[in-house]
């Protein structure tokens, strides 16, 4: 079985060829320009392979409702050239094969659930913290869809009283993305995260905001495992601080085996940053069914 994967990001498009075992045979990356510039290159790449199906994980918002007239569209994205663009339909027209479609972070969650450290679990959360923040949620063994798709990056966070930073989100002054994404770190401290590795106060504050979000997710969704990925989480010194702060914030309210083994409960991504592409391969497999 030969499957295509498209991890469609706001700055780059990652295209890959793989199989049902998650093995990646080929991969290229293209800059995300306009549809007129980028789509012909992508369709040409996939046409050069005799694919059985294609999986697309895209930046959003996106319409995932198969009963909607705009299913498969990227909708109200701030990337204006791609707003209300029928990306799924255009690939269907060009390739004539089954296509699986979801958001990029849901695809990453599916990658971890199919091939990675959430395999075998019914409920889990994958959170990416980088240029933005996003969350894919697995519940009952399936990706969570509802009115739209989870926008967990915009939950409101209680601000540290000493933190006067206004936040970077244009919609909310104190949402998780606005307080804790990579651009927020850089704007608050005047340096990129990678340059601040040895500054303990930076990571204490970052871990505090992430932990506050995780406590809300834990209490509402009761995940069996939480996976943290994205560029910010390459700062591995964050993990022990986050785990400690989550336990402190929960205050002993929950008594489960996961709370007794936080090192195995709140973990890093396990697929060498391939979770998005591998999740798209899984979307392609689902489309074949």
Image (spheres, grey):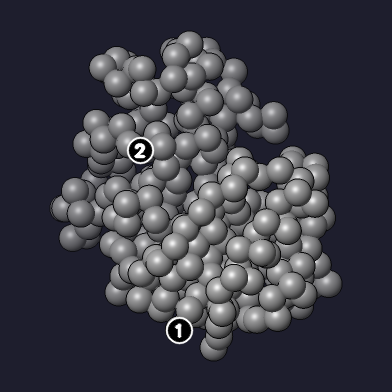
Q: Residue at x 16, y 53 (%)?
A: 261
Q: Quadrant of residue 242?
A: top left
Quickly name the residue at label 2.
Answer: 233
Is residue 47 shown above or below 287? above
What numbered label is drawn on residue 1? 1
Q: Answer few, some or many: residues within 10 Å of disc 2's Cα (few below 14, many 20 plus, some between 14 and 19).
A: some
Q: Nearer the viewer, residue 212 or 143?
A: 143
> What is the C-alpha distance between the residues marked 2 and 1?
34 Å
Q: Nearer the viewer, residue 197 or 13?
A: 13
Which of the marked residues, 2 or 1, is nearer the chain's N terminus?
1
Q: Nearer the viewer, residue 33 or 110?
A: 33
Q: Residue at x 49, y 62 (%)?
A: 16
> x%, y% of residue 285?
50, 80
Q: Which secondary structure, mark 2?
A: helix
Is the residue under label 1 in contact with that under label 2 (CB below 8 Å)? no
> x%, y% of residue 278?
43, 64
The quadrant in which the N terminus is found is bottom left
Residue 245 lies left or right of residue 74; in this view the side is left
Between disc 2 and disc 1, the foreground one is 1
Is residue 113 shown above or below 264? below
Furthest toward the front, the residue is 48
Q: Residue at x 44, y 20 (%)?
A: 192
Residue 252 lies left or right of residue 72; in this view the side is left
Q: Residue at x 41, y 37 (%)?
A: 231
The quadrant in which the C terminus is found is bottom right
């Amino acid at each position: 079985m030969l499957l295509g994967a498209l991890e469609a990001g706001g700055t780059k498009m990652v295209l890959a060829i793989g199989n049902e075992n998650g093995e990646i045979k080929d991969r290229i990356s293209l800059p995300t320009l306009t549809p007129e510039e980028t789509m012909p290159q992508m369709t040409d790449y996939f046409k050069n392979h005799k694919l059985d199906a294609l999986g697309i994980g895209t930046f959003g918002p996106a319409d995932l409702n198969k009963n909607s007239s705009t299913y498969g569209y990227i909708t109200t994205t701030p990337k204006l050239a791609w707003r209300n663009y029928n990306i799924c339909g255009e690939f269907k027209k060009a390739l004539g094969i089954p296509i699986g479609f979801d958001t990029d972070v849901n695809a990453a969650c599916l990658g971890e659930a199919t091939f990675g450290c959430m395999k075998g679990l019914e409920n889990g959360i994958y959170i990416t913290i980088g240029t933005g923040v996003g969350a894919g949620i697995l519940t009952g063994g399936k990706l969570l869809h509802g009115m739209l798709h989870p926008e967990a990056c915009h939950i409101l966070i209680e601000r540290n009283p000493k933190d006067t930073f206004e936040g970077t989100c244009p919609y909310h002054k104190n949402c998780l993305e606005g307080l804790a994404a990579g651009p927020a770190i850089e704007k608050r401290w005047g340096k990129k995260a990678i340059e601040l590795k040895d500054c303990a106060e930076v990571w204490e504050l970052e871990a505090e905001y992430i932990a506050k979000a995780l406590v809300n997710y834990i209490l509402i969704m009761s995940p069996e495992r939480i996976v943290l990925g994205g560029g910010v989480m390459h700062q591995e010194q964050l993990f022990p601080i986050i785990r400690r702060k989550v336990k402190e914030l929960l205050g002993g309210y929950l008594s489960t085996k996961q709370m007794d083994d936080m090192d195995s409960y709140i973990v890093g991504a396990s697929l060498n940053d391939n979770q998005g592409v591998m999740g798209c391969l899984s979307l392609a497999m689902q489309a074949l069914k």
